Image (tube, rainbow, N blue to C red):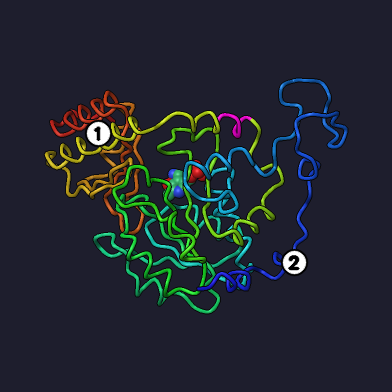
Amino acid sequence: MKSKDIEALVRPNIRKLCPYSTARDEYNGTLGVFLDANESPYPTGWNRYPDPRQTALREKLAHIKGVKAEKIFSGNGSDEAIDLIFRIFCIPGIDNAVAIAPSYGMYKVSAEINDIEMREVNLNEDFSLPVDNLLAACDSNTKVLFLCSPNNPSGNAFSNETVFEVLKRFNGIVVVDEAYIDFCSVPSLIGSIDRYPNLVVLQTFSKARGLAALRLGLAFSNPCIIKFMMMVKYPYNINASTQKLALKALESPIDIYVAETVAQRARIAAALPGFAFVRKVYPSEANFILVKVDDADGLYEHLIADGIIVRNRSKVAGCTGCLRITIGLPEENDKLLKSLCDYEKGDIRR
Ligand code: PMP
C-alpha cells in the first residue's frame, strides 16, 4: 500500500473534520499573562491546561526511539489509540475489523462500542499466525486488522517476516500491539513504519516501564495517520502530571527490571512442568506465562485463598484449562511456587 492510499481509507466525515483548536494550540509559550483559556489565575500548581500536543514528551520519545515526533501519538493508554483507530477508519454499522483470537480483549470491546463488526480468527493450535485465514476473513469493508505480538494471553511473538506478509497482502490498516515488546527477543516493528504506510505500532508505559497508573500509550505510524489521531483525540488527552512524570521516567533505564523479569520467567517456566497437574507450559516472550492445568478453576480458587491472584483464562476459546500468571518480584514468585507445591501435596485451600 502507498502513503497516498491511506487517506482514502479514512472515514469521509473525519477527512473533512475541522478539529477543535485550544487556547494552548494557538499559544503555548511559558511566559506571559495568560488570559486566554478561562483558567483560574491562582497557582494551585495545576491551574493551567496541559500541552494538548505533548510536544516535550513526543520530542523526547522521538530522540529515544529514533522516530520523528510527527510519527508518534501519545494517548490515554494504548486503549485510547485502539479506540481512535476504529473512529478514524471504520464506519459504524458498515465496516468491519479482523483480529486474532485469543488476544487482548479491548479490540473486540472497542469495536462493539463503535458498532463495528469484529471478525475473530483463531490462531493455529500452537498459537502461530494463520495468515491465509486472516486474509480470507477480510472483505472490501475490512478496514483494520489487529495483531498483538507478543500476544496476550498466549505469550508468543510472531516473526517480523510473517507480519510483513500480512502488511503486503492486506489493503487496510494493520495494527501491531507491542505492549510486551521489551520482554521479547523479536525486534520491534517501529523501524518498518516508513516502509509500510498501513502499519500502526502500539506500545505502552504500562508494562516494562512500570507506569500503568499514569495511563500513557503510544502509537507509531506515518505522519498522515498520526495527524488524524491528533485531530480526533480529546484536546487535552494527556494530563499535565502524566506528561511531567513520564518525561522524568524516561531519564531512568529499565534494563535491570526487564532482565530480572526475563530471568524470573525462565525460572517459573522451568519449574512449572515439574508439577503433576501441569499439562502444558506455553513458551513466553512477555512478562507472563500461560499454563494449562488439570483443574484450572480449582487451582485458581486455591491460589486466591492463598492470596495469589492470577488470570483465569480457562473459558477463553483456545485457552481451555489455562491460567495466565504474571511474573512478579522474586519473593512473590517464591510464594507462587510454594503455593503450587502445597496444592500438589493435597494441601488445597478453598
Ligand atoms: N495491549 C495489550 C496487549 C495489553 O495486554 C494491554 C493491557 N493488559 C494493553 C494493550 C493496555 O495498555 P494500556 O495500559 O496502555 O491501555
Q: Measuring from the top left, give residue 257's x and y in whole percent.
A: 34, 31
Q: Is residue 205 above or below residue 96?
A: above
Residue 55, above or below 140: above
Which residues fall within the magenta stretch?
241-245
Of the pair 31 and 198, the residue shown nearer to us = 31
The residue where tag 1 is placed is: 264
Residue occupying the far bottom of the picture? 140
The answer to which of 346 and 235 lies nearer the viewer is 235
Element assignment for label 1: helix
Q: Are marks 1 and 2 in contact (CB under 8 Å)?
A: no
Magenta residue check for 324: no
Residue underneath mark 2 = 16
What is the x, y in percent for residue 294?
A: 20, 47
Rendered view: 225 above or below 154: below
Mark number, residue 288: none
N-terminal-most mark, 1 or 2: 2
Depth check: give the residue in front, 115 or 232: 232
Give percent across and percent down for residue 12: 70, 71
Residue type, numbered disc 2: Lys
Q: Nearer the viewer, residue 222 or 349?
A: 222
